[in-house]
Structures are given as structure tokens and as C-alpha cells.
Amino acid sequence: VTSGTMGLREASRAYGVPVSTLKRHLDKQNKFAIGKRQLGRPTIFTTEMEDEFA
């Protein structure tokens, strides 16, 4: 796609990658997530409290 031999839609069909994903990578957008995302349940104890228990 970057060399111009293949278009976005053609590359999307050939490799099974969504067009929006290819476009985002070509535009160099959203390379790193902004902010901090926490997975799982929220913690009850702070880090200091956990260190006291251990």
C-alpha cells in the first residue's frame, strides 16, 4: 500500500484487515493509547495498604 502497488481496499481484501485499520496505520494515528486503562475490578486497598499487609 505504501509503495502504491496496491490500494487500501485491495490490501484489505487480500490480508483480511479492515480498511480503517490500514488507513490509521498509514496516517500514523493512534500509535499509542492515551491515558491509562485498567482492566478488571477496581482495587479496594491502596498500594501502601497492600505493602503493610505483606
Image (cartoon, helix red, strand yellow):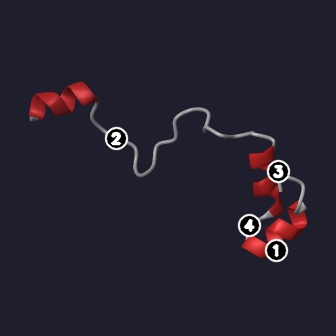
Vertical placement of 29 versus 21: above or below? above
Task: Write down the quadrant of residue 49 in the picture.
Answer: top left
Q: Amino acid at mark 1?
A: Arg
> Which residue appears farthest toward the left when viewing the image?
54
Quarter of the image with the N terminus is bottom right
Quadrant, the C terminus: top left
Between marks 2 and 1, how big is the CA–CA gap?
43 Å
Q: Label for residue 43?
A: 2
Amino acid type at mark 4: Val
N-term-proximal mark, 2 vs 4: 4
- Numbered circle sitting on residue 17: 4
Left or right: 26 as drawn, with respect to 40: right
Give the mark nearer the N terminus: 2 vs 1.
1
Q: Amino acid at mark 3?
A: Thr
Judge whether 26 appears above or below 5 on screen.
Answer: above
Residue at the (87%, 69%) spot, across then down: 10
Please, what secondary structure does the residue beneath circle 2 have?
A: loop
Give the image location of residue 35, x and y in percent.
57, 32
